[in-house]
Amino acid sequence: MDAAVLRNFGEAPRFEQFPEPTPGEGEVLVEVAAAALPPVARLAASNPDYGRGMTLPSVCGMEGVGRLEDGTRVAFFARSPNGSMAQYTVSRSAMCVPLPDGVDDVTAAALYNPGLTSWAAYNWTAKFSAGETALVLGATGFAGKLAVQIAKILGAKRVIGAGRNPEVLESLHDLGVDATIQIDQPDEDLAAAFAKEAGEEGFDVIMDYLWGHPAEVLLSSLPRHLFPTVETRYIQLGNSAGSKVNLHADWLRRTGVTLRPNIPAPLEPMADLGASFHRELTTRAASGELRMDIETVPLAEIEKAWERTDMGGRRLVLIP
């Protein structure tokens, strides 16, 4: 079958033939209709630590949309060596979510992982409530743009978007963002910008897709009190700006910050909850309530697509 095959970490996958997979116990065969190309797929293919458990050669990709042998249309997660960027893959049946008729394959494929992650982070991890404030660090990426919209859907009083791309930052106001912060500025100025938006009470929820140095500056700028009375739920979702931070003890003790992973449990046991979340997301996407910039690319052009750096908040979706 046609597939995007990775043979060596650090290289781009190649469009070539790969054996059609056979489902094992608890798995189903999926005929792939659309497969998303998110940054995490590139990270897993470039870094053996990030791609832990990935065996080579392997088909790239973790999420997509396809059809089961009985014709059911599903969004799915795939695992190495049978990734989603191929004509066929296998998935755990528990990780396949039936899709409503109102949303197309490409939209559902682009939405599945980042949308589900954000929706679960707000509703499950952060227990976000209407009237609270949210800061999205990394708001100019595809996932970050979804996160600011989801915060508004959930009734956020204020949403602040922080990111690099100035054009995308400006466009966030059309998605409901109340204020934006350009993170490509001197640390002192960036800290002042964070502090201004935080005010005396800080943020209720921080959704961080960047980590690294921007997170250090953000954490250092939050208001400090001897006895914090407001909890800031800091949800760590990605690390595109670096995998480590220098964390000062006062940034936790005096700010009321609690650091949390995006989903504090194995994903598979949450399958029913995830399916419920995804139905909500796809329904809102079908109605136009969630706006996304998506570009389709033939799977045969995977090598060119892999090297693209002009995303500007868009998501590439591969079509086998």
Image: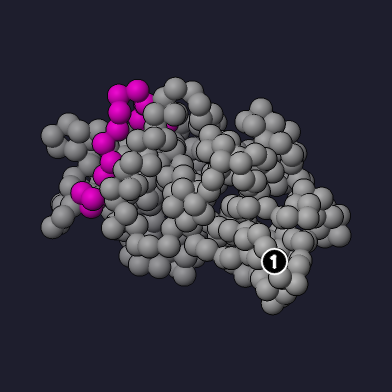
On whether residue 24 falls in the magenta region, the answer is: no
Q: Where 251 falls versus 116 (above or below)?
A: below
**Residue 279 picture location, percent across and down:** 35, 35
Q: Tell me the element at label 1.
A: loop
How many numbered dots are placed on residues in this image?
1
Residue 206 against residue 143 in the figure, above or below: below
Taking the spot 16% from the left edge, 55% from the top edge, the residue there is 26
Horizontal side of 48 relative to 181 (left or right) equals left
x%, y% of residue 239? 58, 60
The answer to which image quadrant residue 156 occupies is top right
Give how far across and how far down residue 111 sits, in percent: 44, 38
To which residue does mark 1 refer? 228
**Residue at 64% across / 32% down in the picture?**
176
From the viewer's perspective, tell me whether residue 93 is left or right of residue 241: left
Q: Residue at x 58, y 58 (%)?
A: 233
Q: Is residue 210 visible?
A: yes
At which x and y percent is residue 37? 46, 44
Which region of the structure is painted magenta? Answer: 92-108
Residue 168 or 9: which is nearer the viewer?
168
Of residues 188 and 304, the one drawn nearer to the viewer in this rendering: 188
Instruction: For label 1, count other residues whose C-alpha is less than 10 Å away and answer few (under 14), some (14-19) or many (20+).
Output: some
Report the quarter where the N terminus lies.
top left
In the rendered structure, does residue 94 fall within the stretch colored magenta?
Answer: yes
Q: Visible in this render: residue 2?
A: no
Q: Residue at x 53, y 48 (%)?
A: 128
